[in-house]
Amino acid sequence: MATHPWHLRQAARHFWLGGLIAYPTEAVYGLGCNPLDWDAVQRLLQLKQRPVEKGLILIASDFDQLRPFIIEQPAEVMAPLFASWPGPATWLLPAAPETPKWLTGRHNSIAVRVTAHPLAARLCRACQSAIVSTSANISGQPPVKSTLALHNQLKGQLDFILYGKLGMLKQPTPIQDAMSGRLIRT
C-alpha cells in the first residue's frame, strides 16, 4: 500500500511542531523527531528511557541534510560512506562544533545515515531535514518490527505513525567509525 502524500505532510507538520513520529526503516520501526528541538529530543529520550549520554543517529534522504551536523572529511575518508549510501550503513563522523550535545551524547562524533528505505527517505524530504532515528522501543526491549508491537509498547505516546513495510534487514543497521574503520555495531 502506497503512502499518500497527505500522510507525509502530516508527519512533517508534527516534526516541525515538536512531535514524535514512528516510521519504518531498513530493519525496524524507527522513532524520530526534529534533531534541533531539545524538547522533542528530551521527550523521545524519556519515552525510550534512554540516557542522553549515549547519543542518537540521524538519517537523511541525501548527504546535504547531514552536512550541518558533521565535519566533512577528506575524500579518502568519505569514499566508503558515499559508496554505501543510500543504504543500510550508519557511520560515525566527527560532529560539527555547533551540533547539540543531546545528539552526540558523551561523544565527539555523530552517527549518520543516508537511508535507502523509500518511505524513511520520503519522510526526510517532506521534513526538509535530517531526522533523529532510533529504534521505536523502550531501551532494553526488543526492537519493534510490527505496528501491533509498536502500539503495544509505546501505548499512544506518539504524535504520528507513518505506516509502511520494513526493509529487508534482520537487524538494525551496522555502525562503523569512518575515522578508524572500526565496526561499532554489527
Image (cartoon, grey):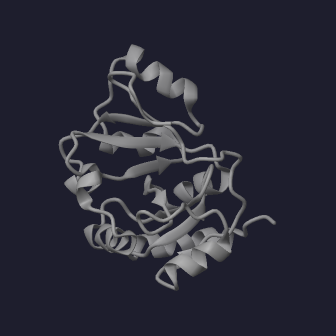
Quadrant of the image occupied by residue 43: bottom left
Q: Is residue 25 above or below residue 39?
A: above
In the figure, residue 35 lies in which quadrant? bottom left
Residue 162 screen position, x and y as percent: 62, 70
Along the horizontal axis of the image, is 72 left or right of 153?
A: left
From the viewer's perspective, is 165 left or right of 22?
right
* Residue 57 pos. (x, y %): 40, 50
Residue 83: give x, y in percent of width and height: 56, 24
Instruction: Give the image location of residue 111, x and y in percent.
Output: 38, 42
- Residue at 53% from the left image edge and 62% from the top image edge: 142
Outermost residue to the right: 1
Q: Nearer the viewer, residue 108 or 154?
A: 154
Residue visible at 44% across and 52% down?
A: 130
The one of 139 and 15 positioned closer to us in this rendering? 139
Does residue 159 lie above or below 186 as drawn? below
Identify the residue shown where x is 59% and y is 37%: 86
Report the residue at 32% width, 73% height from top.
Answer: 46
As drawn, the residue found furthest toward the top would be: 76
How many numbered discs? 0
Q: Work out whether 65 lies above or below 77.
A: below
Judged from this view, the residue extending furthest toward the bottom is: 156
